[in-house]
Image (cartoon, helix red, strand yellow):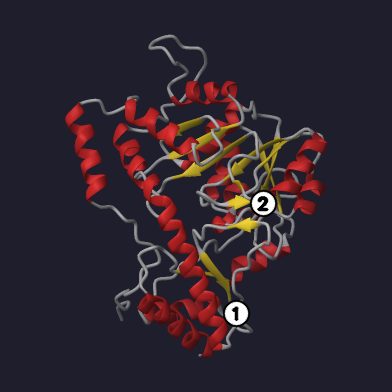
Amino acid sequence: MTDAITSVPIAAPIIGAEELEAVRRVLESGLLTQGPETAAFETEFSQYVDGRPCVAVNSGTSALLLALHAMDIGPGDEVVVPAFSFAATANAVLLTGAEPVFVDIEPQHLCIDPQSFEAAVGPRTAAVIPVHLYGHPAEIDEVMTIAGRHGLAVLEDAAQAHLASWRARPVGTFGTAAAFSFYPTKNMTTGEGGMVTCADEDLARRVRLLRNQGMLERYVYETVGYNARMSELSAAIGRVQIRKLPHWTSARRRNAAELSAGFTQAGVTSLVALPRVSEHAEPVWHQYTVQVDNRDEIQARTRAAGIGTSVHYPTPLHRLPPYQVGRDAQGCRPVAERASRGVLSLPVHPGLRTADISLIVEKVCEAVAG
């Protein structure tokens, strides 16, 4: 038996004539790395994070890793991480030689639970990584207050949250640093790529050193670094995409509202737990993620009906083999474990038409009805 043809994909990167022209321009210039496109992209992205210094890198994972290194996180340190996130959040910690300490999430928006965070702070805790999951901001005010009380660095994982805001302030502007991703399925893309936003120029300088083998001036090595540069091709694409991002964000918000209205009108909210929005948040709906019982069966039915769905994420981080490290690594995080069994992401991308949204609601309702 073959899978049904997906008529409504879970994600649909939008690449058009302007992106193609930007790539052509760079190719014809002959300057493919460390050039004016990257510098311009950093400046243009900075406008969306209250003018913070920005450093473009080759992936969102590199953004996390370099930010941690620049904050002097390393062996002997512990970093508090939500147990429910993409693996890169924990990978970056381990790659510095530090240990992740996994804490539970709050049940409303599935972001880090501030009380669990504070309870996990110990003598070796050096930092915390709140994740703005699915494009909804974490309770960042409380996180910052707790971090300040204990003298901890804060690295916002904003990989899914371009243009999201908390109390009208953009995410990526609260912590010591923040990491964004431009993977193809993100709200904007550079093909592959990431951005570090920094609280000050000194931190940005350290990130720039780390991304380029430890040098700013050729062959003048100030530290040990990586090759984590963003290419001029990626930056040129990013410059086009960021101009379109506000429009795409509005479309995602509209699509999310229509999905919620459709499920509410259909009377299935007792079977389909809809995503909730904090009164202080302006999410950007990287994912529209519901929670259901019998998730795997419902996913199979919706896929068979042509609706692309995905599970973000099927296993909490502390249950995965690479992360059996640190104190209480295998302890219970009940909210994260419950979420991993029930979450199901539905299409919400800007390419959806009204008919697509109606079809999504219809087929999900049929699937939960059995």
Q: Which mark is residue 146?
A: none
In this image, 122 relative to 197: left or right? right
Looking at this view, name the residue that lies furthest to the left: 28
Whole-percent x, y for residue 254 in the image = 47, 67
Whole-percent x, y for residue 244 in the image = 37, 50
Q: Residues within 10 Å of mark 2 (few under 14, many from 20)?
A: some
Vertical arrangement, residue 31 with respect to residue 259, above or below: above
The residue shown at (57%, 58%) is 283
Whole-percent x, y for residue 133 in the image = 58, 55
The residue shown at (41%, 36%) is 58
- Camera-side residue of 267 and 106: 267
Q: Nearer the viewer, mark 1 or mark 2?
A: 2
Residue designated by label 1: 293
Q: CA distance from mark 1 to mark 2?
A: 33 Å
**Of helix, strand and loop, which one carries label 2?**
loop
Circle 2: residue type: Arg
Q: Which mark is residue 167?
A: 2
- Camera-side residue of 98 and 176: 176
Q: Looking at the image, is mark 1 or mark 2 earlier in the sequence?
A: 2
Whole-percent x, y for residue 339 in the image = 63, 67
In this image, 275 relative to 26: left or right? right
Vertical arrangement, residue 131 with respect to residue 232, above or below: below
| Pointer 1 with pointer 2, Cβ within 8 A | no
The residue shown at (19%, 38%) is 24
Looking at this view, name the residue that lies furthest to the bottom: 370
**Of helix, strand and loop, which one carries label 1?**
loop
**The N terminus sits in image quarter:** bottom left
User: Residue 62, can we see it?
Assistant: no
Q: Quadrant of residue 151?
A: top right
Circle 1: residue type: Asp
Vertical arrangement, residue 43 with respect to residue 191, above or below: above
